[in-house]
Amino acid sequence: MRTHVADHPLIAHKLTYLRDETTDSPTFRRLADELVTLLAYEATRDVRVSPKDIRTPVGPTTGVKLARPKPLVVPILRAGLGMLDGMMRLLPTAEVGFLGMVRNEETLEASTYAERLPDDLSGRQCYVLDPMLATGGTLAAAVRFLVDRGANDITALCLLAAPEGVARLEQELADLDVPVTVVTGAIDEKLNDKGYIVPGLGDAGDRLYGVA
Ligand code: URA
C-alpha cells in the first residue's frame, strides 16, 4: 500500500479551519468539499486514459480521454457522502456506488449495512471516499469488498489519517496483489481511547450534518 500526504499550503489552510471547533456545519461542508477537490487532483494522477484524435481550429492532434470502463467512485456512508460532490467535480463522468459501513463504538470493528455497487467490478479503478482513516477497520473492509468484486486498482481519499490506521491498512492488505493508495491531507498524531483522531476534527459525520 502507498500513502500520499498532499502537503500543499492551501490544503493545510483549509484543514485548519475544518478542524476548528468553532467552524459551523455549512462552513465545514464547504471546506470539506473544497479539500476533496484538491485531494482528488492528487488522487487521480494515475487515472487511466486512452488516446483520442481531435481537430483543433489549426489542425489534427491526438489527446486523451478517460478510459473505459469508467472509474467508480464509492463514498462510504454516512460521512463519505460529504465528499462526493467535491470528487465528482473532477470526475463528472464517473459511476457512483454506495457502501454503508458502521463501526461498533465498543469493539471499533466495521460491518456492512448497505451496498449499492455493480456486481462485477472486473478491471475497474475505484476511488473510495472516507473522511477519517482512524482505526483503519472500515477502510480495510471496504477495500476487501471491492477487490472481492474484481476491482483492480483502489485509491482511498481521506481528509485526515491516524498513524494507527495507516499501519493497520498496510498490515491487513499486505496479501492483496491489487495496488491500493491512500491520499490524505495530513497524518495526525494518534488515536485516543475512543478511536478518535487526535487532534483530528471530531466526528466528521456529525460536523457535516449538524448533529451536535
Ligand atoms: N470518525 C470520525 O468521524 N472522527 C474520528 O476522529 C475518527 C473516526
Image (spheres, rainbow, N blue to C red):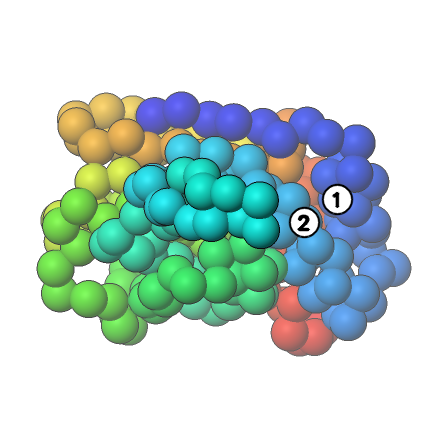
Q: Residue furthest right?
A: 22
Residue sitting at x 84%, y 60% = 23
Residue 207 relative to residue 1: left or right: right
Image-based side of 130 in relation to 97, left or right? right
Q: How many residues crowd mark 1 within 10 Å: few (<14), some (14–19), many (20+)?
A: many
Residue sitting nearer the eye, 71 or 212? 71
Q: Quadrant of residue 178?
A: top left
Whether label 2 touches label 1, CB < 8 Å:
yes
Measuring from the top left, give residue 21's x and y in whole percent.
82, 56
Q: Earlier in the sequence, mark 2 or mark 1?
A: 1
**Label 2 Cα neighbours within 10 Å, binned few <14 / some 14-19 / many ≥20:** many
Query: Residue at the spot x=65%, y=67% of the render?
Result: 208
Q: Nearer the viewer, residue 35 or 28?
A: 35
Judging depth in this view, the residue of 23 and 124 nearest the camera is 124
Q: Where residue 168 sits: x, y (%)?
A: 36, 30
Residue that numbered label 1 is attached to: 15
Confirm whether residue 37 shows in the render. Answer: yes
Q: Is mark 1 within 8 Å of ligand 1?
A: no
Q: x, y (%) of residue 190?
A: 59, 31
Q: Give amino acid for label 2.
A: Leu
Residue 47: x %, y % from top left: 39, 40
Circle 2 residue? 35
